[in-house]
DNA sequence: GACAAATAGTTGTAGGAGCAACTATACTGG
DNA sequence: CCAGTATAGTTGCTCCTACAACTATTTGTC
């Protein structure tokens, strides 16, 4: 029998769930990141940016939209986009209607790189998602995470 | 209508789910981290270590068990524990049966700090978990994440 | 229209984490 | 018992990211 502080239960059901979420995410992000890096020479953070851009209409987003979508600080996003620009995967474009804002748009090279990475990603998901959760379970999970992710 | 490469669908259901997982986790980790830091002056990574230690029998774990539990590299874990030791929250103890191994054990200060942090964490979870997911939904989510997290 | 407040993005700086190379110890087969 | 291999942990180095302070532009208010 393990003795624990009864006032602050480390075994609380919600604490366990939160810990499980952190751990699961960390494992999946790590393994995917390694695979993307090894097979496409593409860091996971770059992949996330490119994916967000493809989802966006006209394949472009403002800096702050990217920062929000990938949950980075604005300063971190500036540097991240710097590296993507240097690699030729995206370009910065000025925004005519708001001279403070900057659009980030995919280049053809970025588009091609994303296709390549998506191939790797899809086979990764086949192995690590489809193999573990049924289609029904996946949509349940999507629903739950959507609730969790909703703005307060 | 948005034009997208049909060969590599960025809108694939599994891709969406994975992205949602990354985003949800990043948001929750960030907000919890800020709160722990502000209210307890305790980085999230330190909290994770202390929590793992309390769960362990005899409140101690070997370095590699910690690295695995919190999904860090062994090198990163060494430095992380260095900082916790310096802060007086844990101590390193040699392992008699294997002289390569090192135990990390909580100090009384670490135990107290964890109690404090768990208070903050529990109220965070009350706000951000209990308010969004019912008890049933939470246990469903736990089940799904457990499957996802299972070793391949 | 002008001043205050809010917003978009960049930069200086510091700290944290990973990888690869390394040391030390333990195991395994001959 | 010895050689070769596997395991535990640390260290050097590099890159990435956050935070805070800053500039530039826009918006809101009187």
Image (cartoon, coloured by chain):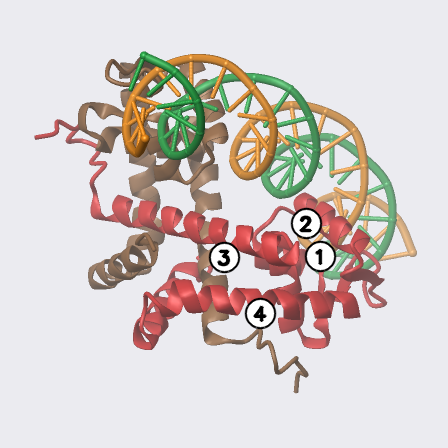
Chain colours: A red, B brown, C orange, D green
Could you say where residue D25 lies in the image, as x and y percent from the top left? 85, 56
Residue receiving disc 4 = A119
Relative to A117, say whether A10 is above or below. Answer: above
Whether callout 4 and callout 2 share a subunit is answered yes
Identified at 44% across, 47% down, the residue is A26
Of marks 3 and 4, the one in the foreground = 4
Residue receiving disc 2 = A77
Q: Which mark is residue A63?
A: 1
For numbered disc 4, what is the local secondary structure?
Answer: helix
Q: Is residue B13 visible?
A: yes
Q: CA distance from mark 3 to mark 4?
A: 21 Å
Query: Residue A77 or B59: which is nearer the viewer?
Result: B59
For numbered disc 1, what is the local secondary structure?
Answer: helix
> CB atoms at circles 2 and 1 under 8 Å apart?
yes
Which of the 4 image quadrants contains residue A126?
Answer: bottom left
> CB atoms at circles 1 and 4 under 8 Å apart?
no
């Amino acid at each position: 029998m393990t003795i624990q502080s009864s006032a602050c239960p480390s075994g609380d059901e919600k604490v366990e769930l939160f810990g499980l979420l952190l751990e699961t995410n960390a494992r999946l992000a790590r393994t995917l990141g390694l695979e993307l890096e090894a097979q496409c020479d593409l860091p996971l953070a770059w992949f996330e940016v490119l994916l967000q851009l493809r989802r966006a209409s006209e394949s472009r987003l403002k800096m702050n939209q990217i920062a929000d979508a990938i949950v980075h600080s604005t300063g971190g996003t500036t540097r991240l986009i710097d590296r993507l620009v240097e690699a030729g995967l995206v370009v910065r474009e000025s925004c005519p209607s708001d001279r403070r804002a900057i659009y980030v748009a995919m280049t053809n090279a970025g588009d091609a790189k994303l296709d390549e990475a998506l191939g790797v990603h899809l086979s990764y998901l086949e192995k690590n998602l489809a193999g573990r959760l049924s289609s029904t379970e996946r949509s349940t999970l999507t629903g739950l995470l959507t609730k969790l992710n909703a703005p307060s």
